[in-house]
Image: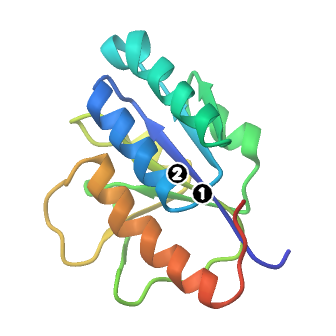
């Protein structure tokens, strides 16, 4: 399967602002879809509707699922990266990102606690090289997705 299709997932989010900021980032990078799993509180009551409107206006896809495992089962990616400081076994260097191919699901935690060990085990636990504290989902997504997309686009990848 030539090319790259990145599928960002925002998991465990209760903050409207964190949800909206992550969606704006994802769509501004030209990615065609965003998956949100385990939304609760204000994010579930108001934020999902706001991101739904944004996705509709931009002609992008937006999916809401109960849990991260559901996203993995639905998307059936070739690879899953779970961006987690606590459980990371590898680091992604934004200056020298990995060249990825196929369908790659990249999960970010929208809450203050990091992913659980069970959630991290759903994929490859990675974190950002040179960062020793959690930055929050929007910043982690920017430092992870942009370099990967830039490297992939230089290699001719597409992401509607």
* Residue beneath the point at 31% across and 14% down: 42
Instruction: Report the quarter where the C terminus lies.
Output: bottom right
Q: Residue at x 14, y 59 (%)?
A: 133
Q: Quadrant of residue 18?
A: top left
Residue 101 lies, in percent from the top left, at 70, 76
Q: Label 2: few (<14), some or many (≥20) within 10 Å?
A: some
Image quarter for residue 143? Answer: bottom left
Say above or below: 19 vs 137.
above
The reply to whether residue 152 is in sight is yes
Residue nearest the observer in this picture, 124 or 94: 94
Q: Is residue 99 visible?
A: no
Instruction: Find residue 27 and name its label.
Output: 2
Asked if marks 1 and 2 touch (Cβ < 8 Å), the reply is: yes
Q: x, y (%) of residue 16?
A: 31, 25
Q: Which residue is mark 1?
A: 31
User: Mark number for residue 117?
Assistant: none
């Amino acid at each position: 399967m030539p090319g790259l299709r990145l599928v960002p997932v925002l998991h465990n989010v209760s903050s409207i602002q964190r949800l909206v900021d992550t969606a704006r980032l994802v769509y501004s990078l030209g990615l065609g879809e965003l998956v949100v799993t385990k939304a609760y509180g204000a994010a579930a009551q108001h934020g999902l509707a706001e991101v739904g409107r944004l996705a509709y206006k931009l002609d992008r896809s937006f999916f809401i699922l109960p849990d991260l495992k559901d996203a993995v089962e639905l998307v059936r990616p070739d690879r899953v990266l779970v961006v987690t400081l606590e459980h990371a076994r590898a680091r992604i260097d934004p200056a020298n990102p990995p060249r990825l191919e196929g369908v790659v699901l990249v999960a970010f935690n929208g809450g203050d606690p990091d992913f659980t060990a069970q959630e991290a085990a759903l994929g490859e636990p990675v974190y950002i090289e040179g960062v020793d504290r959690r930055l929050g989902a929007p910043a982690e997504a920017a430092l992870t997705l942009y370099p990967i997309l830039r490297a992939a686009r230089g290699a001719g990848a597409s992401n509607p």
